[in-house]
Image (cartoon, rainbow, N blue to C red):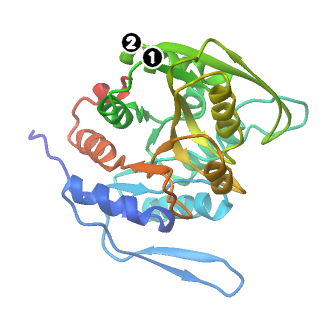
């Protein structure tokens, strides 16, 4: 029996249309047609405007809060399942709600597990995502998960800077594994920031483990939200004698006063991907596209080729 591969179709949730257009162009397929009807109370209904029966479809959409982004992805998946799509791959450049990956105190939800179950219940047959907040979130799914690393996007740029006395830094203890992986590839030293929080997004105290005097420091993290940790770490490192401080953060949430903090900090540059569209431009922010990474993985998934090279730091 011949190895027949059906057509692949790519669709976008509204919050990720710009990235989806880049991915579709690299993949070599047009972006599919979807229209969304909205009721006066805010309820909305996406509708595929072309046949998807028997096809593999990729639905691209980051699920960063507010809840509309996640709800749109769930409705798109459900509509595809009811339209008899053969394979439904949810492409989540940013997997939102991932910071709630465990019970860190009594009577709180594990939102990341809930979101995983919701995606599966809606009808997703595969998940492609990038730089999860915690690797173990892959285990919340019963369906295949392709967890990509943005290091394949960042490392070429980092090498192009030709920084002398390079030191990789983690802004907290939880990100030390990521920092060590970058430092191994770049053959550099590592320093770690130890922080204590009063509450979410509020740091009461920060200390530096390691020496940064005379070093060009690159902070590495999976996301930047209010930018409080990054800017505080950058200022502390400059006080301790660093020559320069840059930051690599995959997902630019940048909520609250993040842009103001960045502008007023000693951080020389913030390097991010376009997994989440920026709310505003800043001379301190450099955006590197992850479109080629996702397009390549989607192509290999569709044609049943290996994607293991995309998992390496």
Label 1, residues with CA under 10 Å away: few <14, some 14-19, many ≥20: some
- Residue at image point 56% right, 23% down: 169
When the figure is inspected, residue 312 is found, relative to residue 188, above or below; the finding is: below
Residue 36 x %, y %: 50, 78
Quadrant assignment, res 154: top left
- Residue at image point 61% right, 12% down: 211
- In the image, is 119 to the left or to the right of 288? right
- Residue at image point 81% right, 41% down: 200
Residue 141 x %, y %: 55, 34
Residue 183 is marked as 1
Q: Is residue 123 visible?
A: yes
Residue 187 is marked as 2
Q: How many marks?
A: 2
Q: Quadrant of the C terminus?
A: top left
Q: Are marks 2 and 1 in contact (CB under 8 Å)?
A: yes
Residue 160 x %, y %: 29, 33
Label 2, residues with CA under 10 Å away: few <14, some 14-19, many ≥20: few
- Judge by depth and name the residue closer to the eye, 211 or 180: 211
- Judge by depth and name the residue closer to the eye, 100 or 88: 100
Q: Quadrant of the N terminus?
A: top left
Q: Is residue 55 visible?
A: no
Quadrant assignment, res 155: top left
- Residue at image point 36% right, 60% down: 20
Residue 223 is marked as none
**Farthest left residue?**
2
Q: Label 2, label 1: how many angstroms apart (C-alpha)?
A: 5 Å
Q: Secondary structure at mark 2?
A: loop
- Judge by depth and name the residue closer to the eye, 211 or 41: 211
């Amino acid at each position: 029996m011949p190895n027949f591969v059906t057509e692949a179709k790519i669709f976008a949730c509204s919050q990720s249309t710009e990235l989806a257009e880049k991915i579709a162009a690299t993949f070599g397929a047009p972006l599919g047609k979807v229209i969304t009807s909205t009721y006066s109370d805010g309820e909305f209904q996406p509708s595929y405007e072309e046949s998807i029966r028997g096809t593999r479809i990729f639905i691209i959409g980051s699920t960063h809060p507010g809840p509309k982004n996640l709800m749109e992805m769930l409705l798109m998946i459900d509509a595809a399942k009811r339209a008899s799509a053969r394979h439904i791959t949810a492409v989540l450049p940013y997997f939102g709600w991932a910071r709630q990956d465990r019970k860190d105190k009594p009577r709180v939800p594990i939102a990341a597990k809930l979101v995983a179950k919701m995606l599966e219940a809606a009808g997703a047959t595969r998940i492609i995502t990038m730089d999860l907040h915690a690797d173990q979130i892959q285990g919340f799914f019963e369906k295949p998960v392709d967890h990509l690393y943005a290091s394949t996007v960042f490392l070429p740029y980092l090498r192009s800077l030709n920084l002398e006395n390079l030191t990789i830094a983690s802004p907290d203890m939880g990100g030390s594994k990521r920092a060590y992986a970058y430092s191994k590839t770049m053959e550099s030293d590592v320093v770690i920031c130890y922080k204590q929080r009063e509450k979410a997004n509020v740091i009461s105290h920060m200390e530096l483990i390691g020496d940064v005097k005379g070093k060009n420091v690159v902070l590495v993290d999976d996301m930047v939200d209010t930018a409080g940790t990054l800017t505080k770490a950058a200022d502390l490192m400059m006080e301790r004698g660093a020559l320069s401080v840059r930051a690599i953060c995959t997902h630019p949430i940048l909520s609250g006063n993040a842009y103001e903090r960045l502008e007023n900090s000693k951080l020389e540059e913030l390097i991010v991907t376009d997994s989440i569209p920026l709310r505003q431009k800043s001379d301190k922010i450099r955006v590197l596209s992850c479109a080629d990474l996702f397009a390549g993985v989607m192509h290999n998934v569709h044609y049943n080729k290996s994607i293991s090279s995309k998992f390496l730091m």
